[in-house]
Amino acid sequence: MSAVLEVASALLLVAGAAFYLAGTVGLLRFPDVYARLHALTKADNLGLGCVVLGLSLQAESLAVAVKLLLIWPLVLAASATLSYSIARRADRLGITPWQGKEDR
Amino acid sequence: MTALEWPLALFLLANLLAALLRAARGPTAADRMLVALLFGTGGVGILLLLGRAGGNPALVDAALVLALLAAIAGAAFARRAWTDGDADERRP
Amino acid sequence: MTVIAAALWRGVAFALLWWTLAEGRTENWGLGLAIIGLATLASLRLLPATALRLSPRGLLGFGTFFLVQSIRAGTQVAIMALRHRLDLAPAMLELPITLPPGAARIWLANTLSLLPGTLSVDIGATHLRLHVLDRRLPIAHEVAQVEARIAAVLGMEK
């Protein structure tokens, strides 16, 4: 394996971990359930995308690389539908979104 | 092979543990459900990293099946919510 | 004719999937061929050839658009989360949808949840309820853009 690929793979893996961290920070810091959903659906999915791409650069064959890349859209679809279910439920239960300080 | 996979897998695991704080704090049931979302993406990431770190390619298949089941469960869930509606839900 | 063409395309797609799942190994191709045939039959039964017509160009356009936008979305929300002061101006919006009900709308809602700053909350009969992280951004314009991309994939050029 070429050194360039190895470095690119390592960078992608670290970037992926950073996005996961941002997602977790958002989950803990953001003011309401909707904002937290934003953090998880976007940051974590990009984090997983980076990890998957990073690992597929090191894959021993093309088929294995494609298999790894196939996981990403599946997880995207899963988290988008789950996020919709949670947001819709929260809305139906009457949870109003946090409006920001300047409006209060 | 890079030696990054082990520490990164542990790092993601630490993320999942930190997210449990959100589940504990709530404040609403919807907030607690968020952790399920994180465990999906995080769990798949951890499985893949461990598969590479331990040289166990079967974990990639495990991650694929997990992702597939999550997608199907999500679709089934959404479909139910779609047809049932939640007329019986009341404001707390 | 459409049925034969659809069967051929779907068969090729399932064969590629099998090749991926078997990690390129060839010793199980007998079983693979049987499963590819069954999967193609099942897919034609469940989703008739006339019900689905995807435009390859539209699909490519959507794919690249989605990739670029999801990188933007992840970076944007990561910066928001990690910045010292939270600078959010969230709001609930109701926007009209032009796509027909069914799969196209679900696809729209799911895509918007993964794009920068928007989160689908409820698909109504005429409107889509969205939560936005920053109401100062041109949300309606972005939603219209995604709608046009999806319409292009489904061959419903506006």
Image (cartoon, grey):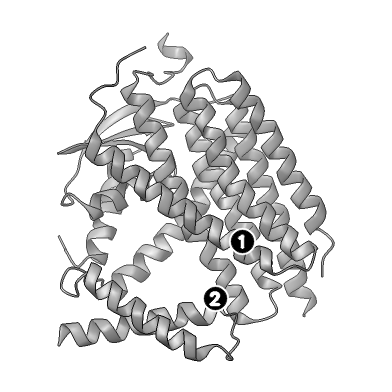
Query: Where residue A14 sits in the image (x, y, percent)?
Result: 73, 54
Task: List x then y, in percent, for residue C82.
Answer: 64, 34
Residue at image position (82%, 70%) is B1
Question: Could you say whether the residue bearing mark 1 is in a helix, strand or loop?
Answer: helix
Q: Secondary structure at mark 2?
A: helix
Q: Is residue C158 above or below residue A29?
A: below
State the residue position of label 2. C21
Q: Above or below — where is B12 with respect to C134?
A: below
Which amino acid type is shown beneath numbered disc 2? Leu
| Residue A19 vertical placement versus B50 (above, below) | above
Judge from the rendering whether residue C155 lies leftward or rightward of residue C39; answer left or right. left
- Do the residues bearing badges 2 and 1 touch, measured as CB atoms within 8 Å? no
In this view, the residue in front, C150 or B59, is B59
Q: Which residue is mark 1?
A: B62
Q: Which amino acid does the dot numbered 1 rest on?
A: Ala
Q: Horizontal and vertical percent for residue C116?
A: 44, 44
Q: Residue at x 62, y 22 (%)?
A: B24
Asked which quadrant contains residue C86, the reply is top right
Which residue lies at the image location 76% right of the left edge and 51% below the top edge? B8
